Amino acid sequence: MKLRSDFITHNSSDESYLVPTSGAEFSGIVKGNKTLGAIVELLKEETTRDQVVAAMKERFEAPEGAIERDVDRVISELQKIGALE
């Protein structure tokens, strides 16, 4: 899976944004925290859910279950808005 090219990302100090271009069916802005930003950055390249979870475990100290839930929630929401290939 991979983030579709018709979505632009922006990260500021503690917030992350995902904005569709005119080619996307979704209209709106997705706003989240650093966790969202880290996951979306990993999704800019072709990857799998398990690879994203592994990378997040290396980057953040959190219980494994919490990381998996966060990754699954972000992937699910991105699929709902058509942001993933």
Image (tube, rainbow, N blue to C red):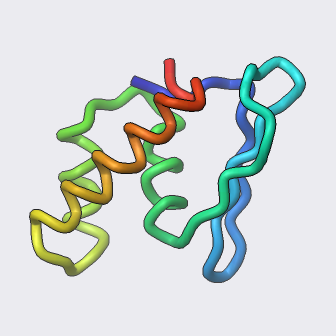
**Which residue is drawn at the image coordinates 43% and 52% (left, top)?**
39
Q: Residue furthest left?
A: 64
The image shows a total of numbered marks equal to 0
Q: Is residue 40 left or right of residue 66?
A: right
**Which residue is drawn at the image coordinates 10% and 66% (left, top)?**
64
Q: Between residues 45 and 36, which one lies in front from this camera angle?
A: 36
Instruction: Tell me where residue 67 sits by quadrant.
Output: bottom left
Picture quarter with the N terminus? top left
Q: Between residues 80 and 67, which one lies in front from this camera angle?
A: 80
| Residue 22 x/y as whole percent | 89, 24
Instruction: Tell me where residue 57 sits by quadrant.
Output: bottom left
| Residue 46 x/y as whole percent | 41, 26
**Which residue is drawn at the image coordinates 67% and 81% (left, top)?**
13
| Residue 70 x/y as whole percent | 31, 59
Q: Is residue 79 left or right of residue 72?
A: right
Q: In the figure, 30 relative to 66: above or below? A: above
Q: Is residue 17 left or right of residue 60?
A: right
**Which residue is drawn at the image coordinates 30% and 70% (left, top)?**
59
Q: Is residue 85 left or right of residue 52?
A: right
Q: Residue furthest right?
A: 22
